[in-house]
Image (tube, rainbow, N blue to C red):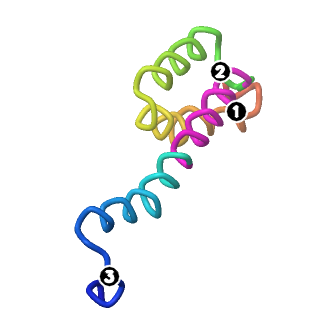
Amino acid sequence: MIAMLGLGGGELVLLFVLLLLVPLALACFAFWIWMLVHAIQNKGLTDGEKIGWVLAIALLHCLGALLYFFIGKPKGNLPAAARV
């Protein structure tokens, strides 16, 4: 099938990068920005927790954003009495 398209090795790598890696990188970047903004605005976190999460997200990039998404973000939905 690839031979029918007339693509060589270099063109296949470029096609792979353009069709898969670029959109994945853009999605990861958008997710990273979303989690960074959410961590800054999360009213369920104390000031110390906010600083810690913002540093973790900024320094660990997508890994930090994923950790925040599953661990820190749900704290914003807790009632005020449960946050103490």
Q: 22 or 5: which is nearer to us?
A: 5
* Label 3 SS: loop
Name the image quarter holding the C terminus: top right
Q: Residue at x 36, y 85 (%)?
A: 5
- Indicate the position of residue 33 as horizontal and vertical percent values: 62, 33
Residue 74 within the magenta-colored segment of the rendering: no
Q: Which residue is drawn at 68% across and 20% down?
A: 40
Does residue 11 appear to the left or right of 42 in the view shown?
Answer: left
Q: Residue at x 45, y 37 (%)?
A: 62
Q: 46 or 2: which is nearer to us?
A: 2
Magenta stretch?
A: 27-41
Disc 1: CA contacts within 10 A as few (<14), some (14-19) or many (>=20): some
What residue would you read off at disc 2? Answer: 45
Whichever of callouts 3 and 2 sits on the residue coming sooner in the sequence is 3
* Label 1 SS: helix
Q: Are marks 1 and 2 in contact (CB under 8 Å)?
A: yes
Does residue 78 sit above or below 10 in this rendering?
above
Q: Which mark is residue 51?
A: none
* Label 2 SS: loop
Q: In the image as oriented, which residue stretches furthest toward the front? A: 6
- Indicate the position of residue 7 as horizontal and vertical percent values: 31, 76
Q: Where is residue 76, by image quadrant?
A: top right
Disc 3: CA contacts within 10 A as few (<14), some (14-19) or many (>=20): few
What residue would you read off at disc 3? Answer: 6
